Image: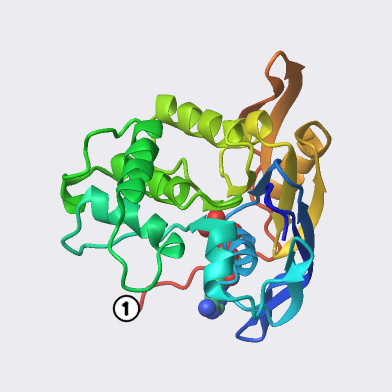
Amino acid sequence: MSAGPVHLRAEHLTVLRRGRAIVDDVRLEARPGQVTGLIGPNGSGKSTVLRCLAATLRPTSGRVLLDGVEVAGMPRRRLARAVATMDQASETELDLTVRDVVQLGRLPHRSRWAAGSAEDAMVCAEALERVDMGGLEGRPWRTLSGGERQRVQVARVLAQQPRGLLLDEPTNHLDVQHQFELLDLLTATGLTVVVVLHDLSLAARYCDSLVVLREGRVEGQGPPQQMLTPDLIEKVFRVRAEVWADEGGTAVRLLGSAGRQIDRPCTMRAPAP
Ligand SMILES: Nc1ncnc2c1ncn2[C@@H]1O[C@H](COP(=O)(O)OP(=O)(O)OP(=O)(O)O)[C@@H](O)[C@H]1O
């Protein structure tokens, strides 16, 4: 396997749940060193696709290739050295410190039962500095705010020193300054990044490529200026938008709801007397 940023490719991914395809024949590519954004409305399958890419979920059919090698059956340690994952549910109420959480990122680099080395401690301290949480190693995890926890989780994936990052809504809970700082940091790593984002303006500004999901299917993949047209935003997100090019790339302004598509009339039953 090469040592540079990973190349990820998903081929014909389908995930069936309760007889329904929640991910339906999804094909996508995350090129080395690029930021690929997964966007789409609630329930469109973004997290499920990300979990397939991370090999934490086995698709019903289809496959994921990492540098041309299928991830299914790849040894966990080899996978963890290649890609680090941060999902929406990285929560714990265990009595951990910030140091403990960030040190989890070092596990793939340690031999079994080995204690953390001085190098591990240095990598973790550096990762915390990068997310503006330097010097807080001793703080109990449960005392952190939602945004601080999110930044510590980002420090954990950075401490893993992977060649690719798979991140589910990493800007969730962050104030605007830290949203920009985090995305600046992620793009500056030069790693392959696949990121689920709800904010279309941030997706337009920071992603090299966008995969648009709708009802489990890929509506299209391409650069933001190609994918984020007012027509596509209205069709997929049911929101009217203005899109224009500026010095930062593609800019999006959401104008308001385009109205809910009602396929059948909604009938309300009168309460029982
Ligand atoms: N185990 C399951 N059983 C049944 N349905 C499921 C299961 N897991 C996920 N789903 C459904 O699959 C769909 C896709 O879920 P997923 O979490 O991938 O969407 P998402 O695009 O990440 O959504 P959000 O933006 O709300 O986080 C949703 O409708 C969800 O309810």
Q: Position of residue 192 (x, y in %)?
A: 66, 46
Please state, as top left, top right, bottom left or bottom right, where the N terminus lies in the image: bottom right
Q: Say which of 133 and 244 sits in front.
A: 133
**Residue ID at (79%, 65%):** 68
User: Can you see residue 267?
Assistant: no
The residue furthest top is: 247
Amino acid type of the residue tagged 1 in the rendering: Pro
- Image quadrant of ligand 1 equals bottom right
Horizontally, residue 44 falls left or right of residue 11, namely: left
User: Can you see residue 130?
Assistant: yes
- Local packing at callout 1 (Cα closer than 10 Å; few below 14, some 14-19, many 20+) is few
Number of marks in the image? 1
Vertical relation: 233 (above or below) 9? above
Q: Say which of 133 and 234 sits in front.
A: 133
Vertical relation: 48 (above or below) 162? below
**Residue ID at (30%, 57%):** 116
Q: Position of residue 161 (x, y in %)?
A: 50, 49
The residue furthest bottom is: 19
Vertical relation: 23 (above or below) 16? above
Q: Secondary structure at mark 1?
A: loop
Horizontally, residue 6 falls left or right of residue 98, namely: right
> Mark 1 — residue?
273
**Residue ID at (50%, 68%):** 268
Q: Position of residue 108 (x, y in %)?
A: 46, 63
Q: Say which of 117 and 71 sits in front.
A: 117
Its colouring scheme is: rainbow
Q: Position of residue 7 (x, y in %)?
A: 74, 54
Q: Say which of 144 and 110 sits in front.
A: 110
Displayed quadrant of residue 11: bottom right
Please state, as top left, top right, bottom left or bottom right, where the C terminus lies in the image: bottom left
